[in-house]
């Protein structure tokens, strides 16, 4: 019995050593599988980093309160908010959390806090601008002796705000800008103020946790299927009605859209030559035209295409040519259960926020019209490392499409021509094109905020690279 004890401990020790070696080997193998992407499941996510402490508040004497009412869709309002924070910073004002448009075509009743994280917005910018959720109670809502309602002049520079707007605060405690679209110039603005615009856009305007979570879920579901293209198919009723573009529509549809255009008194342009406008490249591509362009650019039939848009005019029937060309065509309503989407329905800006998240994360982004969303997404993709974005030349495309559909040129000639036209239209580092006295025609600040990108030194002529704080 005494002699068996050493043997027992020897056997137990060997077994323990063997077990330890087996465990170590399994751990090593599992690490290799994860490292080379061969593991059946994704590695456990690391805990989220703790949020950095908010910056110390900027100490300044406020010259008054700036209240703003945005107008337009989500992405237009986004740029307006960035502009007005920059104006508040320039004039040393206290800013009230912006009011969103509730009277436009979309009739979305969302408040700022329904789309953006209010607390994050205020704390992120506290070292630039003092922001409050509402005006102090001592300021009556209709007291015209202390509040001035006005619209600033479009495409204005810093001198306008310093010399025309700031003196008004000697008489009024509050100025309410009731229109804020394109009220700050693209160019001729100090680098310091341009950086404020970028900081608001890329750092402060964070979507609510609910929108972020659902948007990220969409991206995850798409990524699970492979790489994907985000197609911003701007073929919705409002776009077609107000642009007057009716190519591919039947007479009844064209008349319906015309009546709608006339029903909105604020829309000044009533009679529109659709054919001339399309030939100038001023109309969105139709779903059928978009399918031809994607195929000509070399996208295969099994490409996963996500439609980043609201309700397509004509519904599923209008999408048939696009779906026939790309059967793996998906929309958010196809990827998510109806219950999570229910809270966002009838809120076009919140639905647009989901599309914004997917579009900025996609492997390729291709807009069929250069509207506000296309421009803002382009700018974000530049900021995120110049992710691949293709900017269609619609004027040249409709010319080539008509030649092909009329059988004037072959498919081979069509594809080679489309590819040649777009060889230089994949987003790369570049400087904004400036046009004196033509702000609407020059490059938009938010589509290429080069002051905030890695190529800023090339555009400013300085050796130092400027980054967003």
Image (cartoon, rainbow, N blue to C red):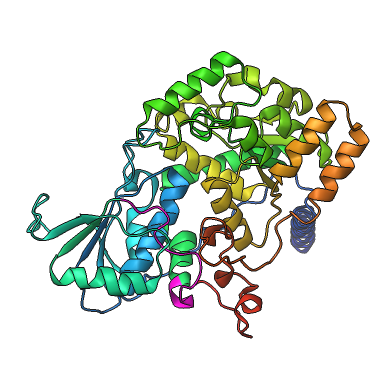
* Image location (x, y in percent) of residue 354: 51, 41
Q: How many marks?
A: 0
Query: Residue placed farthest to the top in the image?
Result: 252
Q: Is residue 3 left or right of 451 when viewed as pictured?
A: right
Membership of 256 in magenta stretch: no
Q: Can residue 71 be seen in this view?
A: yes
Q: Can residue 135 be seen in this view?
A: no
* Image location (x, y in percent) of residue 89: 33, 71
Image vertical order of residue 349 relative to residue 256, above or below: below
Between 152 and 77, the one nearer to me in the picture: 152
Q: Give the range drawn in magenta.
A: 179-193
- Quarter of the image holding residue 221? top right
- Quarter of the image holding residue 103? top left
Predominant secondary structure in magenta?
loop
Residue depicted at 83% across the width and 25% down the height: 406
Quadrant in which the N terminus appears: bottom right
Q: Is residue 399 left or right of 342 when viewed as pictured?
A: right
Residue depicted at 40% across the width and 55% down the height: 80
Q: Is residue 396 left or right of 191 when viewed as pictured?
A: right
Image vertical order of residue 123 relative to residue 219, above or below: below
Image vertical order of residue 37 relative to residue 236, above or below: below
* Image location (x, y in percent) of residue 62: 21, 73
Membership of 190 in magenta stretch: yes
């Amino acid at each position: 019995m005494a002699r068996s004890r050493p043997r027992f401990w020897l056997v137990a020790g060997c077994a323990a050593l063997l077990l330890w070696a087996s465990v170590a080997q399994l751990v090593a193998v599992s690490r290799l599988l994860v490292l080379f992407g061969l593991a059946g499941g994704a590695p456990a996510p690391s805990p989220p980093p703790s949020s950095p402490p908010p910056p110390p508040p900027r100490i300044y004497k406020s010259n008054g309160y700036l209240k703003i009412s945005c107008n337009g869709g989500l992405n237009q309002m986004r740029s307006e908010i960035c502009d007005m924070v920059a104006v508040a910073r320039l004039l040393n004002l206290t800013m009230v959390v912006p009011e969103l448009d509730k009277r436009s075509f979309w009739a979305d009743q969302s408040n700022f806090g329904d789309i953006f994280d209010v607390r994050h917005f205020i704390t992120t910018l506290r070292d630039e601008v003092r922001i409050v959720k509402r005006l102090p109670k001592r300021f009556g809502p209709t007291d015209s002796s202390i509040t001035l309602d006005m619209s600033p002049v479009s495409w204005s520079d810093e001198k306008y705000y310093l010399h025309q707007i700031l003196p008004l605060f000697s008489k009024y405690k509050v100025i309410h800008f009731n229109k804020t679209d394109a009220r700050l110039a693209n160019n001729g603005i100090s680098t310091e103020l341009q950086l404020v615009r970028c900081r608001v856009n890329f750092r402060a305007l964070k979507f609510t946790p609910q929108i972020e979570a659902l948007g990220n879920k969409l991206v995850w579901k798409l990524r699970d299927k492979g790489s994907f293209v985000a197609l911003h198919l701007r073929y919705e009723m409002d776009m077609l009605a107000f642009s007057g573009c009716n190519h591919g529509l039947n007479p009844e549809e064209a008349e319906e859209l015309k009546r709608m255009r006339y029903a909105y008194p604020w829309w000044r342009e009533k009679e529109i030559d659709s054919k001339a406008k399309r030939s100038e490249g001023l109309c969105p591509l139709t779903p059928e035209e978009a399918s031809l362009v994607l195929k000509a650019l070399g996208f295969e039939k099994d490409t996963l295409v996500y439609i980043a848009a609201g309700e397509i005019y004509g519904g599923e029937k209008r999408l048939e040519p696009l779906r026939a060309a790309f059967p793996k065509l998906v929309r958010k309503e196809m990827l998510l259960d109806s219950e999570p989407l229910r809270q966002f329905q009838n809120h076009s800006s919140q639905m647009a926020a989901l599309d914004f998240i997917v579009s900025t994360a996609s492997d390729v982004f291709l807009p069929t019209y250069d509207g506000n969303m296309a421009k803002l997404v382009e700018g974000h993709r530049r900021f995120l490392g110049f992710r691949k974005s293709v900017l269609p030349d619609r004027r040249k495309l409709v010319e080539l499409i008509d030649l092909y559909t009329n059988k004037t040129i072959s498919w081979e000639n069509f594809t080679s021509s489309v590819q040649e036209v777009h060889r230089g239209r994949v987003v790369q580092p570049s400087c904004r094109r400036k046009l004196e006295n033509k702000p609407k025609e020059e490059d938009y600040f938010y589509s290429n905020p080069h002051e905030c990108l890695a190529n800023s030194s090339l555009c400013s002529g300085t050796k130092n690279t400027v980054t967003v704080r």
